[in-house]
Amino acid sequence: MTAHEQISLLRVRVTPKASATRVDRWENSVLYVRVSAAPAEGAANKAVIELVSSVLRIPKSSIRLKSGASSRDKTLEVAGLSRAELEHRIAATSG
């Protein structure tokens, strides 16, 4: 991320150790996701970033964990997308 890139914040609620890694829903500006990784040694956080990267169709390097490293409630910084574009891409994926 560079100093002049547009940064949007994305709130995520994570269920770790799920049977599959997937988006559950987009509700009240929170993305609810399930990841199969356990919340140990950053594995679940890495899985969340990989999933969000796939959903938003952006590189993983454009996403940074801003807060919630050891919590189910996380805030991600997403570089290069406006808030409107971020919400549009999520809505298109989560139906």
Image: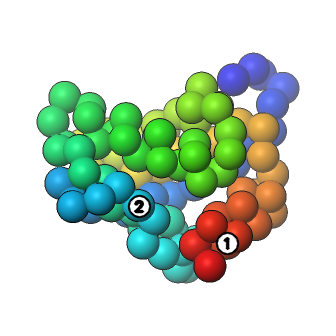
Tell me where residue 12 sits by quadrant.
bottom left
Comes first in the chain, label 2 or label 1: 2
Q: Which mark is residue 58?
A: none
Which residue is the site of mark 2?
22
Q: Secondary structure at mark 1?
A: helix
The residue closer to the viewer here, 22 or 64, is 22
| Quarter in which the N terminus is drawn | top right
| Horizontal and vertical percent position of residue 27 | 53, 79
Q: How many marks?
A: 2
Question: Would residue 28 be found to the left or right of residue 70 on screen?
Answer: right
Q: Residues within 10 Å of mark 2 (few under 14, many from 20)?
A: some
Residue in the image at 84% along x and 26% along y: 4
Work out how far the residue at label 2 is from the one at label 1, CA to CA, in angstroms.
Answer: 14 Å
Which residue is the site of mark 1?
91
Q: Secondary structure at mark 2?
A: strand
| Horizontal and vertical percent position of residue 72 | 28, 56
Residue in the image at 15% along x and 36% along y: 40
